[in-house]
């Protein structure tokens, strides 16, 4: 079945969770996101501070894959980059271009990322490989469960950068 409609990787997650949920999500008007907690700074911005990133292209809603690829070709860092391959859209939190290929940093807003979302991570990497990118390294930036904030937020203590999942 040919379609002009693009699907986001989150649509695939909805379909995997419950086909009826996916079907309804396609037909209902999207409700604005209502966060449970107010964050004074975006987690991705804090992750950029942890990585020491200052000069980067910041993707915006409705950016084309071509624009993001152009910016990645021109610079080293892309944050919230939108990519698309055969109508499957993804948004990668942080991408770093190196001589060996791309380092991809996923941001997990929790203490211990588990392999429950391995399809999500691997689907993102699949899209990047289909677009012709060599993947050098994959990391997950997540919250440090042992961090206790003092007066000032310490992003170096707030986050852990990991290359593995935490499973029981």
Image: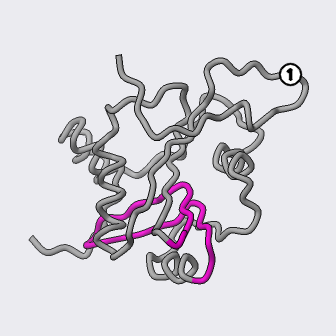
Provide residue 54's location: percent of width, then percent of height.
76, 62
Give the labeled residue for mark 1.
150
Asked if residue 41 lies left or right of residue 128, the reply is: right
- In which quadrant of the rendered view does residue 147 lie? top right
Residue at 40 percent across and 60 percent down: it is 90
Residue extending furthest toward the front: 100
Which secondary structure type mostly characterizes the magenta part of the structure? strand
As for residue 43 lying within the magenta part, the answer is no
Provide residue 144's location: percent of width, then percent of height.
63, 26
Residue in front for this viewpoint, 32 or 115: 115
Residue at 21 percent across and 36 percent down: it is 18
Residue at 80 percent across and 22 percent down: it is 149
Provide residue 150's location: percent of width, then percent of height.
86, 22
Q: Quadrant of the C terminus?
A: top left
Asked if residue 54 lies left or right of residue 35, the reply is: right
Say few, some or many: other residues with alpha carbon within 10 Å of mark 1 (under 14 / 14 to 19 / 20 or more).
Answer: few
Q: Relative to 163, does residue 81 appear above or below in the rendering?
A: below
Q: Quadrant of the N terminus?
A: bottom left
Residue in front for this viewpoint, 139 or 1: 139
Q: Relative to 71, does residue 127 appear above or below in the rendering?
A: above
Which residues are drawn in magenta?
A: 74-99
Provide residue 99's location: percent of width, then percent of height.
52, 73
């Amino acid at each position: 079945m040919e379609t002009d409609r693009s699907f986001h990787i989150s649509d695939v997650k909805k379909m995997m969770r419950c086909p009826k949920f996916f079907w309804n999500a396609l037909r209902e008007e999207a409700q604005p996101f209502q966060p449970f907690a107010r964050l004074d700074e975006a987690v991705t911005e804090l992750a950029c501070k942890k990585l020491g990133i200052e000069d980067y292209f910041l993707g915006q809603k409705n950016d084309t894959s071509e624009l993001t690829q152009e910016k990645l070709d021109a610079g080293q860092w892309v944050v919230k980059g939108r990519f698309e391959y055969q109508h499957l859209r993804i948004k990668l939190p942080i991408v770093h271009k190196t001589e060996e290929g791309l380092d991809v940093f996923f941001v997990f807003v929790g203490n211990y990322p588990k392999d429950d979302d391995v399809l999500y991570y691997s689907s993102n990497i699949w899209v990047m490989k289909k677009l012709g990118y060599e993947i050098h390294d994959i990391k997950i930036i997540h919250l440090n469960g042992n961090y206790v904030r003092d007066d000032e937020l310490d992003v170096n203590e707030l986050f852990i950068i990991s290359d593995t999942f935490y499973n029981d």
